[in-house]
Image: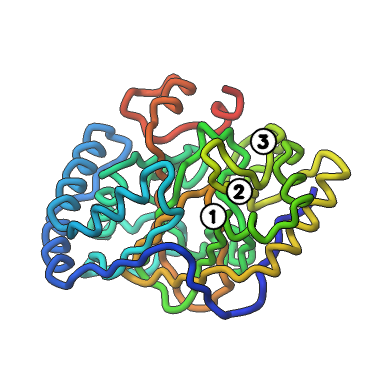
Amino acid sequence: MMSVPSLPSSQASLEVEFPSLCLPERNCEAWTRAADALTFPNYHDLNAWNAFRRASVNLALRHLPEHFAEALEEFFTPTGIPALMFENLPVDPELPPVPTDGTRPRNKQAVSEAVICGLVGTHGEILSYLNEKSGAPIQEVAPIQGMERIQSNAGRVQFGFHSDNAFLPRRFRQNGILLYGLSNRDAATLVLTAGQIIEAAPADLAASLAKPIYRHACPASFSLPGSAALSAPCPILWRDELGLARVSAASSSIEPLTPEATEALNRFRELLMSLEPARVVVRPGTALLFKDDRVLHGRDSFAGSRWLQRAYFTDSLDPLRRATRSDPNAFAFDAGALLCA
Ligand SMILES: [Fe+2]
């Protein structure tokens, strides 16, 4: 088993091909007031959760400027841009202290959650896995006491380039991730596009990485009982039927299945270290959306406070509901059952 690459040490940033739009102040103020009137539901009550989602989408449609809506539509099309950033979005007026146990503070207002649900819900569906953060649809990303040195969303250490949940079959994995800033002075999220990687890869390396000769392990943030969960053999870097570059690399470890895979994985690691990622500080009121298999993401180490919220999204939950025989309104699924489906 080989671990995924660590990050390059350079702190220089790079302009990558994704837009960043800043919400006008008057939209932010009006959206904040309206979202503050909502109450975050008990998400185990699927009717209450759906009502909150619908209300949040209505607010987003009312307060998003037209060019924001167009950017979202472009992002959510299958051939659309791999990443998108919005700034100056609403944040809860009275934010509680950063949680240290990985769970949502009970007294938190519902402003950021309403914006997250609104942004995603215009074109997609939020999903979660029961084996991670208790299946919460919107998850707190903040250091957890005792886990600071683990490469996961609960840690403080440098987190190498990866995709989330690469161990799951592609049809059951999130299409994308939204990160929303609540508190963050300078901890950067790093983004490398699959296009950057594939263009920089020598032809023989790209050919080896496109072969299904790698298995991805379950990440540290999941609790799956029994033996180590591994993906079926799959490629790391490839072009899809539309010619789009795609990449998938587990955060925990990747098992090469052949000598060719071992060599290619080593070269892949070196290649990533030679490339310059975008460094995005997801500050309060910033939403960073990216397609999970169109980029790799990582994180610089950090010392100060950092509290982001995270939501996974996809275009349809029907395949996951069918595979797990879940409630027709379910959004949280058992990763163990999906691995066996
Ligand atoms: Fe991640």
Give above or below for 43 relative to 340.
below
Most extreme residue toward the right, as rendered? Answer: 259
Task: From the image, state whether disc 1 or disc 3 is nearer to you.
Answer: 1
> Picture coordinates of residue 291 (x, y %)?
47, 50
Q: Does the CB distance between marks 1 and 3 fall below 8 Å?
A: no
| Picture residue at 25% right of the left edge, 65% below the top | 89
Q: Would you name the residue on which mark 3 appears?
A: 231
| Picture residue at 88% right of the left edge, 44% below the top | 259
What amino acid is labelled 3 in the image? Ser
Earlier in the chain: of badge 3 and badge 2, it is 3
Earlier in the chain: of badge 1 and badge 2, it is 2
- The answer to whether the beta carbon of the residue marked 1 is less than 8 Å from any atom of ligand 1 is no
**Circle number at residue 247:** 2
> Picture coordinates of residue 200 (x, y %)?
67, 61
Give above or below for 218 relative to 22.
above
Q: Which one is nearer the viewer's eye here, 219 or 269? A: 269
> Picture coordinates of residue 260 (x, y %)?
85, 45
Q: CA distance from mark 1 to mark 3?
A: 19 Å
Q: Does the CB distance between marks 1 and 2 fall below 8 Å?
A: yes
| Picture residue at 14% right of the left edge, 65% below the top | 27
| Position of residue 197 in the picture relative to residue 101 (left or right) | right
Rendering quadrant holding ligand 1: bottom right
Earlier in the chain: of badge 1 and badge 3, it is 3
Q: Residues within 10 Å of mark 1 (few under 14, many from 20)?
A: many
Instruction: Look at the numbered disc 2 and give the secondary structure of its residue.
Output: strand
Q: Residues within 10 Å of mark 2 (few under 14, many from 20)?
A: many
Instruction: Look at the numbered disc 1 and give the secondary structure of its residue.
Output: strand
| Picture residue at 80% right of the left edge, 51% below the top | 264
Q: Does the CB distance between marks 3 and 2 fall below 8 Å?
A: no
Q: Would you name the residue on which mark 1 appears?
A: 295
What amino acid is labelled 2 in the image? Val
Q: How is the image coloured?
A: rainbow
